[in-house]
Image (cartoon, rainbow, N blue to C red):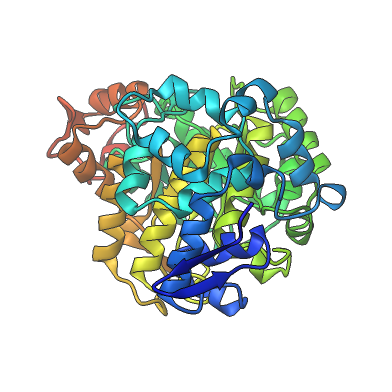
Amino acid sequence: MILKTTLAGRTYAFKDVKDVMAKANEQKSGDVLAGLAAETDSERIAAKEVLANMLMSDLREHPAVDYDIDDVTRMDQDGVDTAQYNRIKNMTVGEFREWLLSYDTTEADIKGATRGMTAEMVAGVAKIMSNLDLVYAAHKIHVESECNTVAGRRGTFSTRLQPNHPTDDVEGITASLYEGLSYGCGDMLIGLNPVNDTSASCKAILERFDDVKRRWQIPTQICVLAHITTQMEAVRQGAPTDLIFQSIAGSQKGNESFGFTTETIREAQALLREKGTAKGPNVMYFETGQGSELSSDSHFGADQVTMEARCYAYAKQFQPFMVNTVVGFIGPEYLYDSKQVMRAGLEDHFMAKLSGIPMGCDCCYTNHMMADQNDLETLTLSLAAAGCNYVIGVPASDDVMLNYQSNAYHDAAAVREVLGLHPIAEFERWCERVGIMENGRLTDRAGDPSIFTERSGL
């Protein structure tokens, strides 16, 4: 394994695989903040060249966090399919990229290779791909999952309806929920981020979601994104729950900083399969985002793209129904501007799909970041073209509780029309029954939540 190269008469040497991986990454303010980034564009190009000439086996043999101290590494390494790994281990990273992008490489071929890859192998190939490469390769891969409905089928583009409220007022939440439904939003999930992380508040919101879902016979899933332990207590108290949620990190230390362990997730999964309201079998929901491990000093000197890939390696152990990156939420400390946000969104989606994850994205930004709504919409369209399973929808693009900007309720409808995509089939049929959609397009009644106050249900 050669860790140096010469460009334009200058030799660039890197101290180890982790150093190459970090410096080969496209510029991210988080890597700069952590002192890991390439100092010049020339050094970045040199690192990419060194990385492209490494063997895929080199990346597996040098995980970002040691096997002996980290359960994310252990689960990832122990889960590798040896036969599939042996087929790709002697390819260089550059050769593997070319194989992914080849016309002759099919979705079935890629899904086979997925079983033989670790997170570092996934991250490595992402670092030497252009944005269009990331879109093209991800578009080849569709990952389906099933809770109450089947998500991720080719030709669909779904939404999580996010009716957040600054005080968790159930009536205010309901008003926002009806508005979102009136735009045909919510086929992936009706899911709220609570202000109050208590089992009582969680239970009250879930009961309202369940009432609306049952009254209107909506084919979807419901979830309140409280802490995993809060949701578990609400389920024990009888709260109707289709999915249990948790934000995850790419290291054991990072997950412990979030207040849970692997055993907590296993316990939650077993609890929901026993007492939950979904038919399953996929009952977990995870969120990620580049930079979270830097915030908790749990990145072990690895760059944020590599740590993000490790999130997906961890998530797939629990067969989730849905995963999404909240790509611009943390702020400019880790993704400085729209260019970095768009790159991160495309990287995350590609890496998750290559890992075998049913992946969506919260295309968002904070108001102290160098980005705007046009950037967000460009990312959304690119992700939909790449086969992204779903995006988030909030009223007028403005989340009044989390205080950040995301997609509006109606954005997905425009993207669907441009690209010829549809909601999940059962949900689209429901929209037609209510009068919101016809022939795959929104009707004149769309955007009018009074539909749900004029009648008591279906």
User: Along the line of sight, which residue is nearer the eye, 139 or 296?
Assistant: 139
User: Along the line of sight, which residue is nearer the eye, 168 or 272?
Assistant: 272
Q: Is residue 92 above or below residue 348?
A: above
- State the residue at coordinates (22%, 43%): 415
Q: Is residue 323 above or below residue 216?
A: below
Q: Residue furthest front?
A: 9
- State the residue at coordinates (40%, 64%): 341
Visible residue check, residue 99: yes
User: Along the line of sight, which residue is nearer the eye, 106 or 326?
Assistant: 106
Tell me: 363 left or right of 313: left
Q: Residue furthest left?
A: 444
What count of labels does the image hold? 0
Q: Position of residue 256 (x, y in %)?
A: 79, 56
Tell me: 209 left or right of 397: right
Visible residue check, residue 409: no
Q: Position of residue 344 (x, y in %)?
A: 44, 58
Q: Is residue 245 above or below residue 305?
A: above
Q: Position of residue 217 (x, y in %)?
A: 42, 24
Location of residue 292 (image quadrant)? bottom right
Q: Position of residue 159 (x, y in %)?
A: 38, 41
Tell me: 401 left or right of 444: right
- State the residue at coordinates (16%, 27%): 438
Location of residue 40 (image quadrant)? bottom left
Which quarter of the rendering shows the C terminus? top left
- State the residue at coordinates (71%, 68%): 296
